[in-house]
Image (cartoon, coloured by chain):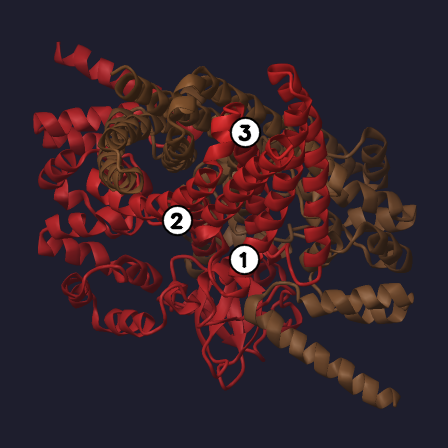
Chain colours: A brown, B red
Amino acid sequence: MAEQQNETAERADRDAAREGDEDFALDPRTVEAIVAAVEAGDAAEIERLMEPLHPADIADLMEQIGQGDRARLLALWSRGIDGDILTELHESIREEVIDALPPDVLTEAVRDLDSDDVVDLIEDLDEPQQEKILDALPDADRVAAEQSLTYPEYSAGRLMQREIVTAPEDWTVGQAIDYLRAAKDLPNQFYHVILVDPRRHPVGYVTLGKLLSSKRAAALKDITEDSFRPISVLDEEGDVAYAFNQYHLISAPVVDEDDRLVGVITIDDAMAVLDEEHEEDVLRLAGVSGESSIADGVIETVRQRTPWLIVNLATAILASAVIGEFSASIQAIVALATLMPIVASMGGNAGTQVLTVAVRALATRDLTGSNTRRIIWRELMVGLLNGLIFAVIMGGATWLWFGQPMLALVMAAALIVNLLAAALAGILIPLGLQFMRLDPALSSGTFVTTVTDVVGFLSFLGFATLVLLRH
Amino acid sequence: MAEQQNETAERADRDAAREGDEDFALDPRTVEAIVAAVEAGDAAEIERLMEPLHPADIADLMEQIGQGDRARLLALWSRGIDGDILTELHESIREEVIDALPPDVLTEAVRDLDSDDVVDLIEDLDEPQQEKILDALPDADRVAAEQSLTYPEYSAGRLMQREIVTAPEDWTVGQAIDYLRAAKDLPNQFYHVILVDPRRHPVGYVTLGKLLSSKRAAALKDITEDSFRPISVLDEEGDVAYAFNQYHLISAPVVDEDDRLVGVITIDDAMAVLDEEHEEDVLRLAGVSGESSIADGVIETVRQRTPWLIVNLATAILASAVIGEFSASIQAIVALATLMPIVASMGGNAGTQVLTVAVRALATRDLTGSNTRRIIWRELMVGLLNGLIFAVIMGGATWLWFGQPMLALVMAAALIVNLLAAALAGILIPLGLQFMRLDPALSSGTFVTTVTDVVGFLSFLGFATLVLLRH
């Protein structure tokens, strides 16, 4: 019987592995099995199921399960938590998990981390929790982490690791290889040897592959890579991620204000930043806080989303006040009330298209001073063409529906006006926000739909009042 | 005079460098200077300004300038185009540029590329252009590229490079180092030596750093990395990018259907895929084709955007038909026409928030079978809470504005109903699309706002008709 159970468990594991292999992510069946073990209080089974998982998948699992299951899991399995899992956890549950760990587990967990991971782990924690972790570090690591924390949030200084491999600029390949082969404390991951002058200014770097394949007598400075691009500690992490992606960097030296080498950033950290920035952008465009997570509870979620709904309510009231001005016209021709949302909706959608393209082009540095005028012109032309297309379609539809040619003309004119307004608002509002050094993703959507709602109702009801009622 | 001009030019260059240093991207002033040189037909000046630029920046520049300038630039400077620039160009202008190149320049440009870059370059070209480039390649590279093209689009097989560094699994560190030092044709970039068994199955990999710092007598198989994770040639590139980001991979071996090693994917390619997929997602959410580019002309842009506007028109007409059903009520109480867009707008915004969070969580594998029920429940609770909050605010505002308590009650009830509908539609529609193996980002927005428009108008006008008019 026990054997049969084991067999079933094994088959499930194999299935899970195959499924997992297919799309890499954590398998939902594994999550269910672990939740079942947690609810049964079976620590040995949890251990068995957790053992093959990658720290990133364990972190995802802890985010996916509910708060109650998480607390029970931590009580049963706190010794399993290591530093890698902690750094992978979303900020929204990191504090909760750290609070639940016995002090010795926490100490053990953070001791093995590289300096950049320690900083990443503690930068968003409360002061007392930060202290708890800093105290657990060996002195040298503690000083390094504290130093990194003096750099501004989201700066290259926070992102870099301080473990670097350097060589004097006048060394040969042979000297560098001998040095590396004798070195004790090399970083876990490194891809380049950075050449420094006597004042510790980085002057170039050599890949390990090039080092291995060059003659021992060759000078290091003759085999450096073109891609060498030092980053300043104060550069923003978003700019750093952009540089890695744009210039295909694998690692880049980080220098202080005196151009002296203080650390190195590697591509895996840059990739994580790129991913986070994208995530924030897309959420902000929809009026959701960029910090939101699948692990957030109801109250936290309401807190993140309500502010933009309030802003939207204010703009909706504004649009509705515009309609209120035309009550008499609507009373006279009730078809106006039926048709007016179409004008607003088409404008809102077209505006959102233009705006999204503009926000993305600004984020990827594709929309710059040199092509702004051309792009504004393009969007105006697109808006005009779309306006003409939908004027014909919807003008025709209105004529068929209500049999009133003048009403159809009013619809056509309002659509052209509103699609032009959508084009202008969609491009000028993000540009204006960027010019004022605000995040173009953050509030463009609301402003643009306010414009298209107000212009949509105003033009449609206004034309109708002029054409249909003043005769 | 000439000297003074040179000095001015130099100062501008220094300024540009400093500015460029600040945010890495191509400097708009450089673009302007190059456009000026193009218009003046000054080939020497173009050469001077282009020389310090990175291929990725040159590609950006060609995307940013207008089509006319681009043609003139290519005529004056075609010899400057190399393979790296071609691979960086956005697909929308790549064909145009390749067509403008003299055959010998094109041959020269593609000869130096790695196999993955050749495939990336040609996969979207027309047959004749593909042939032109394949013919320019040395035989071995041509065969490799043709082989890669037999894998499906967006598969790991298209993404991988075929240049790999392997060692038999039973070698020692010393043997591997000697082999590498003697090897002639190592890839431009490599970070691991992949261990293979006699049947060419990859069994592990060793970083170059570990190789350099280990004793010559050590067995390679004792110093392999835990992160080792083979990828199948048929895996989708999006899944590959996810795996790199999730598991902090730097490179990963690619195996065929028989688990034999056929290539390797490196993190810089995975990062580019991650970036593209994000870009497509955000554009699709806004109803724009994921292929769109800042270099597209007016007609191309209209072609990309009109289809979703037509879908939106259909749904707007549906919503407006709902309003039409209540013409009598609106004629009786014209305030209904004024207030009804508020209910629809609040629902649309709340629905977009829920939907965006859901689409992102699906893309990042954070929303899975194991937490779906919890998240649906959370969104319903958030919708209910938001409904209550805005029922109070907007109910109160309606009472103050129109002085009719029953109208205020109708507004409050309609808001609660529509925010609940927004929550349900926002989560269930992307889940349903995903379940049907469609892209949840592609059409969710239209479906969700259709639901919130229809439910918004129906509930508000319906309640009003029941409560205010049937008494």
Q: Which residue is mark 1?
A: B242
> Residue B420 versus residue A177: which sits nearer the camera?
B420
Q: Looking at the image, do the residues carrying marks 2 and 1 touch, with CB atoms under 8 Å apart?
A: no
Q: Is residue A308 above or below residue B254?
A: above
**A183 to the left or right of B155:** right
Q: Please indicate, yes or no, whether residue A335 appears anywhere in the rendered image.
A: yes
> Residue A10 versus residue A338: which sits nearer the camera?
A338
Provide residue A268's location: percent of width, then percent of height: 56, 49
> Residue A288 versus residue A238: which sits nearer the camera?
A288
Q: Which residue is mark 3?
A: B342
Q: Chain of mark 3?
A: B
Q: Nearer the viewer, mark 2 or mark 1?
A: 1
Kindly indicate the quadrant of the structure image that contains residue B399: top right
**Cα distance in 3D space between marks 2 and 3:** 66 Å
**Cα distance in 3D space between marks 2 and 1:** 34 Å
Q: Chain of mark 2?
A: A
Q: The disc labelled 2 sits on which kind of residue?
A: Ile
Kindly indicate the quadrant of the structure image that contains residue A463: top left
Provide residue A191's location: percent of width, then percent of height: 52, 52
Q: Nearer the viewer, mark 2 or mark 3?
A: 3
Provide residue B323's location: percent of width, then percent of height: 46, 38
Q: Please indicate, yes or no, whether residue A227 appears anywhere in the rendered image.
A: no
Q: Chain of mark 1?
A: B
Q: Which residue is mark 2?
A: A223
Q: Looking at the image, do the residues carrying marks 2 and 3 touch, with CB atoms under 8 Å apart?
A: no
